[in-house]
Amino acid sequence: MRPGAAALALSALVVLGSAPPAPAPPLPARMADTGGGTQLITAVAPERASTTGTVTWWDRSDGRWVKRGSAPARFGANGLVAGTARKQGTNTTPTGLYGLPYAFGIKAAPSGTAYFYRRVHQDSWWCQDNDSLSYNRWTEPRAADCRAAESEHLIDYSTQYAHALVVGFNYERPVRGRGAGIFLHVSGRGATAGCVSVPEEAMRRILAWVRPGGVPHLAIGTSGGRTAITRY
């Protein structure tokens, strides 16, 4: 054996016998804030200009986060923007960490749904009129001070609102002009006007999984940069 060959062989054995690197912690474990509950939905886009990405739902069990499912997602036609900087009508999805006030849908709630689920009727509207007292709220019937042209007639969106979750963006203390009617809903033909969407089967699975006691939140963000989802 050539001089030094034995040492090289021993070195190779040491490398081959070394333990593999530890897997990266799951995404929620790398986030600064997950909302304090035991259920979390993450909606991640590769970058701010992206209109596609991935939605994943997680449970916290025995002190660790466990992935329960994932699905392809669609975002706003003009990508994502920090929720605090968003402007209404820009077709951007607001990044941030948000509660999920309740679920709704044109179709009946999927089997196993425990979350409060509101059925859409012919006179169900979501007010987006900045001049209305009902701004960023469901009204049934449409509020007198909420213009139809500045509202969504929910039943008209038979595909997207077959099933949905209200996202708590600009909801508790609405800022006029920031945006209204942000939901996690069923995907249509393409990018959204600012919501996050997933295939209908995934939306049904999410609604059968989510529980009020889990205090679920939705985190929307990008893989890196200023809107990185790990910043929440």
Image: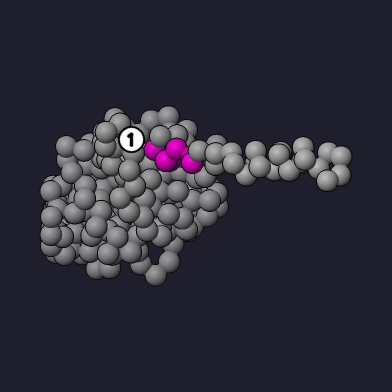
Residue drawn at point x = 49 percent, y = 41 percent? 23
Q: Position of residue 154 (x, y in %)?
A: 23, 60
The image position of residue 6, as x and y in percent, is 77, 40
Q: In which quarter of the image is the C terminus?
A: top left
Q: Does the magenta stretch include residue 51?
A: no
Horizontally, is 109 left or right of 135 in the view? left
| Colouring rule applied to residues | one colour
Q: How many residues crowd around disc 1 within 10 Å: few (fewer than 14), some, or many (20 or more)?
A: few
Residue that appears at 24% across and 68% down: 158
Residue extent of the magenta highlight: 23-28
Residue 173 visible at all: no
Kind of element beneath mark 1: strand
Q: Give the answer, above or below, for where 146 lies relative to 71.
A: above
Residue type marked 1: Arg
Q: In the rendering, at what x and y percent does residue 37 appear?
A: 26, 33
In the rendered structure, the answer to whether residue 143 lies left or right of residue 181 reads: left
